[in-house]
Image (spheres, helix red, strand yellow):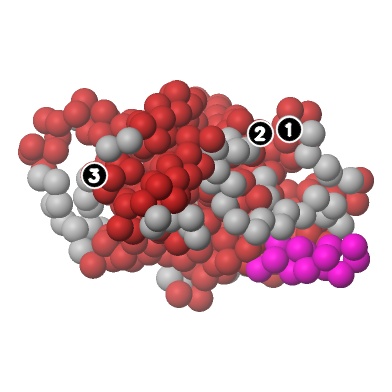
């Protein structure tokens, strides 16, 4: 039992470390893409990014089916004409509307983000949104019955303080006004929206989607993302016609889209096997690394508080993970729903009849 627990904790640290690295690199690619004051249509980038995530998830799901021992390639096309594929599509379609809810929430969050940042600035926005760390833990504990012990709660509190302290080193020239307080309210609304959407998404990946594989859930999520982003594009088609779809695009934008595909897969793994609260904790650690990278690479302002925040954040993160009780479950093979299993089993039955 103890050896198995240590093995799972090693996997947990490995997954969280990889997620932290992926999260740190993403905003750096964004900054490189807008280097020199280059402006482009963000909606097109988001739409293409969601589409590429869907393509990757569909490809990986197809690979899961083909690599299954019960799968037979020479009977594949005959199985497509049967009822198994239809049943699978119907099952996906029934649960797909639920994934539209977090998709819409994230779309609203991204839209409000620009308004809030314009009113209060990025550093203040980040400080306000760090409230999502304890809030996500509270919501996950109450609604999803996640195990968070007292030592982890202490780590969450110090982690929140450390994250805010690190971002405070970037504060310069604050001007308190009516617009500033509106921006604070928008940042708080964004935080609540993000926590609610993340918690509901964890519910879909674990409780509701327990009998579905990771990639089938990813297909549902990113197809919903494609639907919302393309709908948003249609609403703003006049702007797209004026500026063009790929106006001012550069190499860094394309690299960023590819990196988002990796990030999308990592988020799916975190949601299904770790949890939304841990994802928020990982993001807070990544935020400190992003600020420090900006200091050394982009020559952002440096403060001694940043060093203190680094020590507090990483020690708190280490304590949070060390005292974590529920770790990644061992998964020998992808768990399929009845429709997914029948899609493979029908192929196997055809092979038996042929033999």
> Which of 260/60 is in front?
60
> Which numbered disc covers residue 207?
2
Membership of 86 in magenta stretch: no
Mark nearest the camera among 3 and 2 is 2
The residue that mark 3 highlights is 44
Residue at image coords 43%, 70%: 298
Residue at image coords 67%, 45%: 275
Relative image position of residue 215 (x, y in whole percent): 47, 48
> Which numbered disc covers residue 110?
none
The residue that mark 1 highlights is 144
From the viewer's perspective, tell me whether residue 342 is left or right of residue 223: right
Which range of residues does the magenta coloring cover? 1-14
Relative image position of residue 39 (x, y in whole percent): 23, 52
Between the C-alphas of marks 1 and 2, the distance is 9 Å
Q: Say few, some or many: other residues with alpha carbon within 10 Å of mark 3 (under 14 / 14 to 19 / 20 or more).
A: some
Relative image position of residue 1 (x, y in whole percent): 90, 63
Local secondary structure at mark 3: helix
Mark nearest the camera among 1 and 2 is 2
> Which of 284/181 is in front?
284
> Which of 174/93 is in front?
93
Vertical position of residue 55 compared to residue 24: above or below: above
Between the C-alphas of marks 3 and 2, the distance is 33 Å
Local secondary structure at mark 1: loop
Q: Quadrant of the C terminus?
A: bottom left
């Amino acid at each position: 039992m103890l050896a198995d627990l240590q093995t799972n904790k090693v996997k947990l640290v490995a997954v969280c470390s990889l997620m932290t690295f992926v999260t740190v690199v993403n905003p750096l690619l964004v900054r490189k893409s807008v280097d020199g004051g280059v402006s482009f249509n963000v909606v097109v980038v988001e739409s293409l990014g969601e589409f590429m995530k869907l393509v990757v998830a569909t490809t990986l799901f197809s690979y899961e089916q083909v690599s299954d021992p019960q799968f037979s390639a020479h009977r594949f096309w005959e199985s497509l004409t049967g009822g198994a594929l239809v049943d699978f599509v119907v099952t996906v379609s029934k649960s797909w509307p639920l994934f539209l809810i977090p998709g819409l929430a994230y779309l609203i969050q991204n839209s409000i983000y620009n308004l809030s940042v314009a009113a209060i600035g990025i550093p203040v926005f980040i400080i306000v949104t760090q409230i999502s760390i304890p809030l996500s833990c509270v919501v996950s504990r109450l609604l999803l019955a996640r195990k968070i012990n007292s030592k982890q709660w202490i780590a969450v509190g110090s982690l929140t303080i450390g994250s805010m302290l690190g971002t405070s080193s970037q504060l310069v020239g604050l001007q308190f006004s009516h617009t500033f307080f509106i921006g604070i309210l928008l940042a708080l609304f964004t935080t609540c929206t993000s926590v609610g959407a993340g918690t509901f998404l964890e519910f879909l990946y674990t409780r509701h989607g327990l009998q579905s594989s990771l990639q089938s859930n990813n297909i549902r999520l990113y197809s919903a993302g494609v639907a919302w982003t393309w709908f948003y594009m249609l609403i703003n088609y006049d702007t797209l016609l004026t500026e063009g779809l790929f106006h001012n695009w550069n190499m860094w934008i394309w690299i960023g889209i590819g990196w988002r595909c990796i990030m999308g897969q990592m988020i799916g793994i975190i949601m299904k096997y770790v949890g939304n609260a841990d994802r928020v904790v990982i993001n807070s650690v990544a935020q400190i690394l992003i600020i420090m990278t900006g200091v050394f690479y982009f020559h952002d302002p440096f403060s001694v508080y940043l060093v203190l925040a680094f020590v507090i954040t990483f020690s708190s993160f280490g304590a949070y993970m060390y005292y974590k009780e529920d770790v990644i479950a061992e998964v020998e093979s992808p768990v399929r729903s009845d429709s997914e299993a029948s899609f493979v089993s029908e192929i196997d039955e055809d092979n038996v009849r042929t033999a």
